[in-house]
Amino acid sequence: MEEESRKGKAAAPWVAAVEEQLRQDGVGDRAAEEARWRKHSVYRVPAHIKKAAAAAAASRYEPQLVSLGPFHHGRTDLQPMEEHKRRALLHLLRRTGRHAGDLASAVEAVAEALEDVYMDLDGDRWHGGGGGGRDRFVKVMVTDGCFLLEVMRTAEVDGEVDDYAANDPVFSRHGELYVFPYVRRDMLMMENQLPLLVLQRLVAVVRGPHKATDDVINDMVLRFVSMTRDPPPITGDGLALHPIDVCHRSLLHGTPPPPPSTSRKRQREDEFVPSATELEQAGVHFSRSPTRSLRDISFRRGTLYIPELAVDDTTEHKLFSLMAYERLHAGAGANEVTAYN
C-alpha cells in the first residue's frame, strides 16, 4: 500500500530534476567523466590556496597589467591595456592584409573547445546562445591573441618594428624594457591563460599553416616566457595547453625521476629539508648543474649541483603560478616545481 502511494504521488521538483540529470548527465560513467575533466586546463585559483600564504597572496595569482582570456576581462584596473590590444589587432591586419573576419572565423571554428578549457566559465556571459556570449568570447580570443603575437614579434626583433612609432609606449624598445617583463609575468598567471590553440589558429591565417605547427608555436611562446636562458625546445609532445604549460615543460625537460618507494613516501611526510644557508654552514658546497632542468639535481662529494634559474621581481609570481598549475591540473604530472621550491 505504501509503495503504491509512493508511486502515485508526484515527485518533488528537485527529485524529478535529479532523475532527469541522471538520465542526461552521464554521472557514474567513468569515460564520460574523464573526458569532461580532460577538457579543462585553465582554473580559478581557490581561496584556500590564495589564503595559504600572506594576506597579499591573492595578487600572486592575478594579472597586474593586462587581462588575457575571459576570467579578468573587463577589470577596471586593467583597462589601460585594452587600447594597446586594439592597436595591435589593427596593426597586424594592416600589415598582413587579412580581414578581422578571417581571424574570427578561424577561432570560431574551435570556440567550443576553447570555452571548455576554462573551468567555471560564466556561462551567461561567455557561452553560446543568446546575448552575444559566443561573439564576445571570440572577440576576446582574437584580440588577446593578436596582442600576444605582436608583443612576441616586437621582442624577437629587439623592439625595432617598422609599422610602430619608435616612441610607441608598448611596441618599441621602450616597451620591451619596461612593459614586456610584466606582460610575461601576466602571461604566466594561472587565471590569465590564453590557450595556445588560439595562437595556432591565428598564425595559420596570417603566416600560413607551415608556420603554425605545434613545435613552431611552442617554441615561439617559450622564447618569450622562458625562465632560463637558452631553453631547450620542447618537441614531440604536441601543442602545449597554454604559456604555463610551455614553461612547466621547459623547466622539467629530461628524464623524469623514478617514483619513490612506499617507504620513501612515508619518510617524506616528516622529512625536514634544510635551507641553503644551513646546508652551506654545514659544509655543503653549491655548483651549477650541466643543464637548466629542475630535474638535474645531484649531490656528489660534498657538492650539491642545482640548475641555474634567473631571478627578477616577477619570479615569485611565476613560481606560485606553476605550483598552482601542479595542484589544480591532474595532467601536469608530479609536483616537481612545488618540490623544488
Image (cartoon, rainbow, N blue to C red):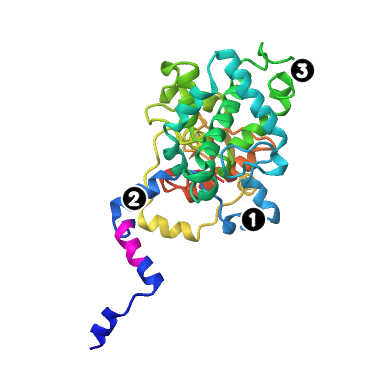
Q: Earlier in the sequence, mark 2 or mark 3?
A: 2
Res. 185 in view: yes
Neighbours of disc 2 within 10 Å: few (<14), some (14-19), many (20+):
few
- The correct choice, above or below, for 238 with respect to 150 in the image is below
- The answer to which of 172 and 278 lies nearer the viewer is 172
* Residue at point 55%, 33% (across, down): 139
- The answer to which of 180 and 120 lies nearer the viewer is 120
- Where residue 236 sits in the image (x, y, percent)? 37, 27
The residue most toward the bottom is 1
* Residue at point 55%, 24% (across, down): 223
* Residue at point 43%, 24% (across, down): 215
Three-letter residue code for mark 2: Glu
- Where residue 279 sits in the image (x, y, percent)? 60, 47
Res. 228 in view: no
Q: Circle 1 is placed at which residue position?
A: 53
Q: Earlier in the sequence, mark 1 or mark 3?
A: 1
- The answer to which of 169 and 221 lies nearer the viewer is 169
Three-letter residue code for mark 3: Asn
Neighbours of disc 1 within 10 Å: few (<14), some (14-19), many (20+):
few
* Residue at point 38%, 58% (across, down): 263
Task: Name the mark on residue 34.
Answer: 2
Give the secondary structure at mark 3: loop
Does residue 108 appear left or right of residue 74 in this picture? left
Give the secondary structure at mark 2: helix
Q: Circle 3 is placed at which residue position?
A: 167
Indicate which label's residue lies in the foreground, 1 or 3. Answer: 3
| Magenta region | 18-24
